[in-house]
Amino acid sequence: MFEHIDAYAGDPIFKLVELFQADPRKDKVNLTIGLYYDEEGKIPLLASVQEAEKRSAALKKPRAYLPMEGLASYRQAVQKLLFGADSVAVKDERVVTVQTLGGTGALKIGADFLHKAFPAAEARVSDPAWDNYYAVFQGAGVPTSSYRYYDAKTQGLNFTAMMEDIAALPAHTIVVLNPCCHNPTGVDPSAEQWAQLIPVLKERNLIPFVDIAYQGFGRGLEEDTSVIRSMVDAGLTFLVASSFSKNFSYYGERCGALSIVCQSKEEANRVQGQLKATIRRVYSNPPTQGAQAIAAVLQDAELFKQWDAEVAEMRDRIATMRKLAHEKLKQKAPNYDSSYFVDQFGMFCYTGLTKEQILRLRDEFGVYMLESGRVCVPGLNSGNIDYFVDAVAAVVAP
Ligand code: LMR
């Protein structure tokens, strides 16, 4: 029956995780998938989450189906977190938010919705981008290609090229944007650059699809939403995929959301109806427990404060590792410019190491990073950073 079915080549990120897990070496270092690890190299279960889970469990609520759009308290909390407590757009009820299966689920529901609304629309993602964007959008029938973004020479943003490409797009092109902590490069446009880009998105009638998976890992929970808030202020109609995987360290619970900012309450109602229809035909309705715990944290002042501090701790540890890696590399490999460690933001940095160097790191030292040269910074800790630095110094040595 399935003789014609091709073998799966594997996902470039998860494939490496499997390779890493199978590696018997004791001093191996995992800098592959975007997971936050603490100083002990463990994925934390946040104290705020533990408390919320305890409270939810005590309620012994039955597990009936949620509505297609998800848990109401969770959806409201997402809106407050993304758009602000005083958002006029939220007050005017022109923002629709549905609970989704992680950020990827939000992208999928958004892509299906957009493909139905604009069957000829194409999507553009940054070059480079998170690989899975191609699979998600193309899987939804949306042809996907890239706009210029990263400049390998400066290891920074090629903003002129990015603007040129985006300004030349036909109306109703879906433009996927990371508002903070760009994956995979850690290179973000500055506030001034966003201020130039946002009016172009509006004038050209483009469909911005903002993907925020790292809220709180850049500058702060509130600060990292500034691009989203500016888009609302500029009167854009746009989509936001958001995820609690990272900032709640809640990866396996698949808690995300898709929000769409519309022009009126009446338009928002119709859009919400179509999102419900999309969800119904993909997975019917989302699961209960993760969303309940998140809503409990976000709606309780004390737990929110505790969570905010836990996010700050994760963010600060990443910043410390970035600084340490840079300082140590300066000493161990003085001819190698590792300033990207401190110039780039969030969970990832883009090392610019060659394929050969990356393979040597993996084969000779058991240091695993993506083949693009992306490093997941929180994979580093005070126990393995010297080993990592020595390994990098060895492969970049002239
Ligand atoms: C990553 O980029 O490593 C994360 O977003 C995890 C994933 O699903 O790929």
Image (spheres, grey):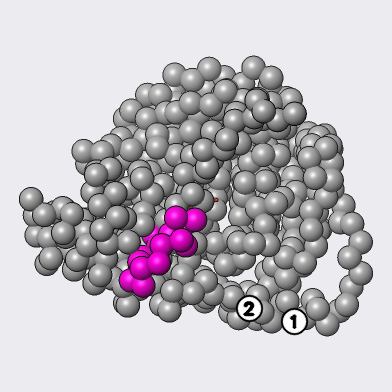
Q: Assign the N terminus to one quadrant of the image.
A: top right
Left or right: 331 as drawn, with respect to 310: left
Say which of 28 and 93 sits in front. Answer: 28
- Residue 131 visible in the picture: yes
The image quadrant of residue 366 is bottom left
Which amino acid, mark 1?
A: Lys
Local packing at callout 2 (Cα closer than 10 Å; few below 14, some 14-19, many 20+) is many
Residue 73 is a magenta residue: no
Q: Residue at x 74, y 25 (%)?
A: 116
- What label sits on residue 119 in the rendered view? none
What's the residue at 25%, 52% (across, down)?
A: 360
210 or 136: nearer the viewer: 136
Q: Residue at the location (7% across, 50% down)?
A: 398
Residue 350 lies, in percent from the top left, at: 32, 49
Instruction: Report the Cα–Cα distance between label 2 and label 1.
Output: 10 Å
Task: Determine whether, in the image, residue 257 is placed left or right of residue 58.
Answer: left
Q: Observer-nearest residue: 217 or 390?
A: 390
Q: Give yes or no for contact between labels 2 and 1 (Cβ–Cβ under 8 Å).
A: no
Element assignment for label 1: helix
Seen in the picture, residue 270 relative to 297 is either above or below; the reply is above
Q: Position of residue 304 (x, y in %)?
A: 63, 74
- Residue matched to label 2: 48
